[in-house]
């Protein structure tokens, strides 16, 4: 049997490069955590704890932003941003329907109302023109998501926010170190949230952080989601002291994850560089494959590649995306569509839905919003055409990227076979 025979028909699978176990922790990180546990230093209530201070100051320096607040998760970090910006009470926040739920649930959990703008087809990133069309007198903020490690157009979104007097929030949970207009994401917003769970670019076990250039936002966020509002820390504002109590979200960073953050950040630049070099090698090796295409980015933008996203072109392939993905899986390459449907169409955003009660049903009902009627055609198109690859390839591997591309080339050479397969499976009329 020819080596070019598809694995679906008994051919030898091309296979895919094996990424090393991820996340990777250095011996120093493991030793420091072990020593921490041995001395019982399990709780850090603020920067009076040396490992909490080390982590937050190290992240702020790496991000290039004045203030960092460690949290339990990326969702907690985004929620802290909304708390610090005092966005609540039915305030509207314009965001994307093409994302993970935490980008929207943080809005809902602070008593605000998400409003959905559309996205760019090729990247799934928030479309500033669509954002501008959704602004009303009730709009208080824009929340942009740097999905897959791609940077949203923060230059334009910052201009819109400034012209309209709106807060700008960044969700960088998949985009540590991503670059827009020559600057790291997280440097454009009034506040930004990042996830540091074990699958992210800056990976611990489960953690996150909020960064902000504004001292007032930092302290109001701390007041709302840290033990006693971090009122024992140096610099706590005197005007907030009358409001210190334990009516807080328990979002404080664990000392274990604080150590992991401090150690992981020492090598994250090298790992992001590996992701980028592998993405570039894969892109070059994909030359001649017309059934999928990779996004193009502005010269001063550089994704950090939490995942690698592609666009399937059914008009060129002549087959469905499902058949294409099935053939790839047989060759040993697992692709997936990360976003299953526009969040605006999810059932739990319908306040009339017969479901377990949520804290946001009444807020949405009072807003008069009906999300099912919101047109997001580019988001729907993106979901129907997207193929994603996990991208924890943190060590440069040109041969592995060539092998990965070989699976796509093999399918490209056998598209006629797959077209015949689909034709044979079509139900006959009459």
Image (cartoon, grey):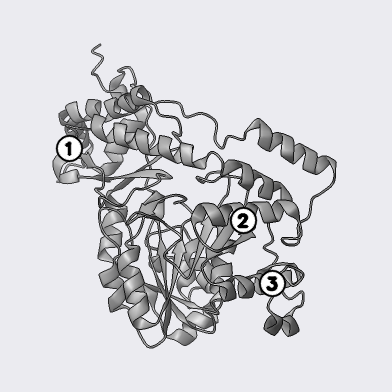
Instruction: Give the residue pinned by disc 2.
Output: 57
* Residue 406, visible in the rendered structure: yes
Q: Where is residue 99 in the image (x, y as percent from the top left)?
A: 42, 58
Which residue is at a point 68% across and 46% down the rendered structure image?
259
Question: What distance separates the C-alpha of mark 2 from that of mark 3?
Answer: 15 Å
Label 1 or label 3, whichever lies nearer to me, is: 3
Check the picture and name the quadrant holding the N terminus.
top left
Which residue is at a point 25% across and 71% down the rendered structure image?
129
Numbered-mark total: 3
Tell me the element at label 1. Answer: loop
Q: Where is residue 208 in the image (x, y as percent from the top left)?
A: 59, 55
Which residue is at a point 26% across and 43% down the rendered structure image?
294
Q: Position of residue 117 (x, y in %)?
A: 33, 70
Q: Which of 403 and 374 is in front in this view?
A: 403
Please tell me the numbered disc located at residue 235.
3
User: Upstream in the sequence, badge 2 or badge 1?
Assistant: 2
Please tell me the numbered disc located at residue 290.
1
Please tell me the numbered disc located at residue 384.
none
Tell me the element at label 3. Answer: loop
Q: Which of 293 and 45 is in front in this view?
A: 45
Relative to 58, say whether 322 is above or below. Answer: above
Relative to 331, say whether 213 is above or below. Answer: below
Tell me the element at label 2. Answer: helix
- Quadrant location of residue 249? bottom right
């Amino acid at each position: 049997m020819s080596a070019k025979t598809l694995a679906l028909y008994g051919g030898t699978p091309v296979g895919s490069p094996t990424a090393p176990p991820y996340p990777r922790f250095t011996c120093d990180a493991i030793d420091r955590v072990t020593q921490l546990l041995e001395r019982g230093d399990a709780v850090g209530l603020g920067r009076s704890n040396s490992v909490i201070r080390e982590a937050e100051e190290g992240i702020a320096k790496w991000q290039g932003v004045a203030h960092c607040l460690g949290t339990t998760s990326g969702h907690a970090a985004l929620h802290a941003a909304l708390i610090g910006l005092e966005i609540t009470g039915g305030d509207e926040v314009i965001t994307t329907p093409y994302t993970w739920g935490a980008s929207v649930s943080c809005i809902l959990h602070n008593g605000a109302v998400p409003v959905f703008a559309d996205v760019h087809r090729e990247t799934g990133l928030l479309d500033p023109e669509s954002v501008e069309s959704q602004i009303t007198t009730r709009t208080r903020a824009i929340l942009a998501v740097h999905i897959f490690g791609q940077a949203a157009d923060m230059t334009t979104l910052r201009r819109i926010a400034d012209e309209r007097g709106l807060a700008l929030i960044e969700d960088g949970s998949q985009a540590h170190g991503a670059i827009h207009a020559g600057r790291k994401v997280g440097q454009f917003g009034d506040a930004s949230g990042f996830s540091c769970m074990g699958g992210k670019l800056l990976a611990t076990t489960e953690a996150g952080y909020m960064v902000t250039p504004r001292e007032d936002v930092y302290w109001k966020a701390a007041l709302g989601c840290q033990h006693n509002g971090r009122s024992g820390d140096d610099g706590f504002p005197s005007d907030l002291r009358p409001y210190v109590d334990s009516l807080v979200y328990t979002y404080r960073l664990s000392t274990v994850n604080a150590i992991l953050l401090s150690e992981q950040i020492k090598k994250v630049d090298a790992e992001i560089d590996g992701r980028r070099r592998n993405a570039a090698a894969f892109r070059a090796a994909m030359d001649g494959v017309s059934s999928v295409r990779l996004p193009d980015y502005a010269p001063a933008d550089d994704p950090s590649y939490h995942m690698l996203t592609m666009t399937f072109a059914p008009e060129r392939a002549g087959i469905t995306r499902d058949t294409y993905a099935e053939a790839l899986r047989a060759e040993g390459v697992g692709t997936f569509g990360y976003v299953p449907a526009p969040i605006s169409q999810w059932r739990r955003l319908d306040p009339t839905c017969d479901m377990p009660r949520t804290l946001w049903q009444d807020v949405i009902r009072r807003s008069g919003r009906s999300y099912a009627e919101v047109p997001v055609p580019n988001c729907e198109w993106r979901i129907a055409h997207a193929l994603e690859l996990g991208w924890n390839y943190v060590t440069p591997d040109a041969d592995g990227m060539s092998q990965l591309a070989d699976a796509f080339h093999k399918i490209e050479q056998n598209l006629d076979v797959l077209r015949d397969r689909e034709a044979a499976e079509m139900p006959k009329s009459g």
